[in-house]
Structures are given as structure tokens and as C-alpha cells.
Image: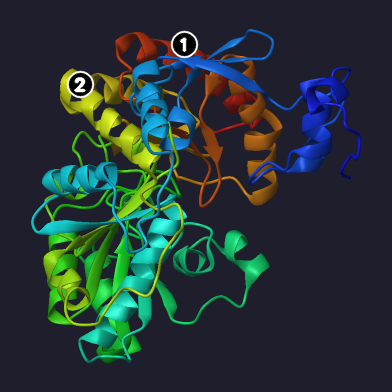
Amino acid sequence: MSTTSSEPVSKLSADATLQEQARRHLWMHFTRMGGYSDQAEIPIIVRGEGCYVYDEHGNRYLDGLASLFCTNIGHGRADVAQAGADQAKELGFFTNWSYAHPRSIELATKVASLAPGDLNRVFFTNSGSESVESALKLARQYHRLTGKPNKYKLIAREIAYHGTTMGALAATGVTELRSPFEPLPQGACHVPNTNTYRLPADYPVSELAEAVAHRIEFEGPDTVSAVIMEPLQNAGGCFTPPEGYWQRVREICDYYDVLLISDEVICAFGRLGEWFGAQRYDYLPDMITTAKGLTSAYAPMGAVIVSDRVAEPFMTGSNSFSHGLTFGGHPAAAAVALANIGVFEEEDLLGHVRRNEAPFKAMLDRLLELPIVGDVRGAGYFWAIELVKDKQTKETFDDEQSETLLRGFLSGELFRRGLICRADDRGDPVIMLSPPLIADQEQFDEIESILRPLLIEAGDRMKVRG
């Protein structure tokens, strides 16, 4: 309900706490709002510094998820924030609809210089979902402009998450996220992901890539527009690609004239130790979608990076990409992104991740000693720990047990003990870790000191068989 009082909002709210205001007015994303009561506070984070954030009570937490895979350079970088403020003084905003401004030009040029191969065109967005949505629309229009208007279908992977806008949601392979909004845009279909930990014994690893070809054939090659995949799949718990997987998928896409979209909203900008995940796994996509680490979330921004070949039909005659976003390429956000990339280069964050990947993995591998830990997988600064009911048989927890384990115990206890990470069951139960790229052995040791006793306690509670 709005107020008609002429009193300042700050004065009207003087007697209300942030908790009360949050419960009354703030609608949090992907959040069970009914779970908060007078006895269950909403976590309110008020500041950050380096790898740590602090709540309204002054408690410190290790940000083991980089604020949802975002703050790659860490918290509290006043120099990066200042770049946005300085730009706002000069030019607070101008659109990229038929106009340009210096920061968007400079950022597009910089991003193109970092991207692999001939990915030289940069279309700016405001988020990862918008980047995916834009790439899917671009793929459809590309085929129309090149004389193949029936190529509209999309192939993604099971359990994969690609965003929440309607097109991106159609690509998403998580049933519980899709079902409330069906029917979704037509044409999206899914193939097996690369979860080799749970691959049936009679299913060859090589068949994971061949499944893409089989699906294209089944759908009809003349109807398939694009394949979209993450270099390392997030949902389900850091599914890494088998050797040669990406090279074979690239061959399949070329053979059937299907565009390959590398969804790197998480994997780009150092998360895997390279500017882009495609460089980590040595393949060349037709488009890269990104966001999060582009600015380390000091400003909202995303991008679609497009190859010269795919961009070419849009650059001639009266053609244009029939799509746009008012704030795409915002001057202040572009200035922040340039400053963020400057930190990467000046402080060698890619090298830091590569140097510290092995000790990070070694710490997590030590947790395999625990009966409840079935698998550890990932790359760079992006890892998952899969939790099992029986280590020998790989038996997982049923839905009720998973609810008890993750939301009834682990999520709350992790936070209470000072570690922010993700306890997730889109697929089998996992704990996901993705700290700021500045983290080193001190933070790895702290993560282990919290996770180890907590996982031991969780195993005892759930009567896990070792």
C-alpha cells in the first residue's frame, strides 16, 4: 500500500527495522517467502570486503559462492565502483539504439580482443537471462536471413539452467522451474548432460556428444537452429565435459548447419582460469553469452559475443537485428566493466586461478574420505561436492530426505557457521563452491574447517552408509 504522507520515507520508517521492512515489502528471488518469521530472520548483508561479507549484526561470512558466481574480483573494490560514478558525471546515460558512446565502443573492442577466434561483435544486455534470450532470437533471425526460415528449434541439455525469461526458460532443463510457466515457446528439446559419475555402465562416454547428432536427426536438420550448452554445466553440480566432447559437438553443429552457443554467464571472466570457458576446453562457438563476471556485478551487465560469420547478414543493406534493450551497453556499466577487466589484467587473476586450482581441488578431494561425499568435480574456481546415501552403490537421497538434508539442515548451518555456498538439488544433492577469484589457501582451509565437521554431522543425521 502506498503512502500519501508528505513525510520523508526515512522518517516514516524510523521505527521500523530492516527486518520488518523486508518482510512487508521485499519479494526475494527464488525464495520461499513463507520460510521467514519472527524466529527466522531474513539474512541482510550490509557490506563486503575481499572474500568476505558482513550482515546487519556484524557477523562475517566467507562468500564461497562469489555472490552467485558474480563478484570475481572480490568485494569492496572502490576503484571499480568509482569508474561508474565518474562516468555518470560525464554521461549518465545514452542508449545504444542507433547511437553509440565511447564506453560501449571501448568495451566492445576490449571484449572482442579477449574472445576466441572471430567472435568480434558484441551485443550488450543487462543480465545472463537477457544474453541467452538475445542469442536465441539472433540464431532464429540469422537462419531467416540466410534462407532457412524453418530452422527454429533449440537443443540444450538435461538439468541445465539457462535463465528465467521465456525463451531461456525453454532451454532450461529443470522441470520444476519450467512447469509453472508452461506452455513455453515451442522448439526446445534436450539431450543427456555430461554427468559421468552417474553414467550407466552400458552407455559409452562418446555417446554423450553423439546424442546431439541423434537429436538433430530426430528433429530434422532443416528445423534445428542452435545448440546451447555451458562449457561446464552448473545445475546438477559442475558437470565437466569428457575429453573430445566439445570438439565433436562443434563438428556436429558444422555438419548440420546449426549454430553453437556457449553459455558462459558463469564460466567466462576467469571462473575456469581463462577469459572464456571455450578457451579452457579448446572449442570455437558461434556465440558466447555472458554476464556476472563481466563487471564482477559492480553493475548489472551482460553481452552476446558473436562471430563475424553470424553477424555478417545483419551488417548489409537494410537488415538489422530486430531486438534491443533500453539499458544494454549503459555507459556507467560499461565503465565498470572496463575497470573490472583492468583489475584482471593488472593483478593477473587468470594466473592466480590457474596456480591455485590444484590446491583448491586437493582440499575438496580430502573430503572424499567422508561417507556422505560421493563425488568431487569441477575446474578452476567452480566445484561441486555430490552427497550420497550410500558411497559404495552411489545411492542418492529421495526427495523427502534431500529436503531434510539440504534445507532442513545444511543450508542454515553453513550460513550460521560462516560459509555462504549453495546446497542444491536440481538433480542429485550437491554443495557448490565458487569463491571470488582472489581466494587462496587461507580461504580453502577455512572452507574445509567448516565443511568437514558439518558433513560428518550430516552423515550421522542421515544414517549414511560408508
Query: Which dot marks residue 352?
Result: 2
- Residue 17 location (% of width, % of height): 82, 20
Q: Amino acid at mark 1?
A: Ser
Residues 153 and 93: in front is: 93
Marks 1 and 2 in Cβ contact (< 8 Å): no
Q: Residue at x 67, y 28 (%)?
A: 409
Query: Which dot marks residue 355?
Result: none
Q: Say what secondary structure mark 1 lies in.
A: helix
Q: Residue 296's image quarter?
A: top left
- Residue 186 location (% of width, % of height): 49, 82
Outermost residue to the front: 90
Q: Quadrant of the N terminus?
A: top right
Q: Residue 45's image quarter?
A: top right
- Residue 16 location (% of width, % of height): 86, 21
Q: Say what secondary structure mark 2 lies in.
A: helix
Q: Is residue 431 above or below residue 102?
A: above
Q: Is residue 14 above or below residue 7?
A: above
- For label 1, count other residues whose C-alpha is less than 10 Å away and answer few (under 14), some (14-19) or many (20+): few
In the picture provided, is 79 more to the left or to the right than 67?
left
- Residue 363 location (% of width, % of height): 33, 19
Residues 122 and 97: in front is: 97
Number of disc labels:
2
Q: Is residue 434 above or below residue 440?
A: below
In the picture provided, is 455 more to the left or to the right than 76?
right
Q: Earlier in the sequence, mark 1 or mark 2?
A: 2
In the picture provided, is 117 more to the left or to the right than 461?
left
Residue 161 appears anywhere in the view = no
Query: Which dot marks residue 449?
Result: 1
- For label 2, count other residues whose C-alpha is less than 10 Å away and answer few (under 14), some (14-19) or many (20+): some
Q: Amino acid at mark 2?
A: His
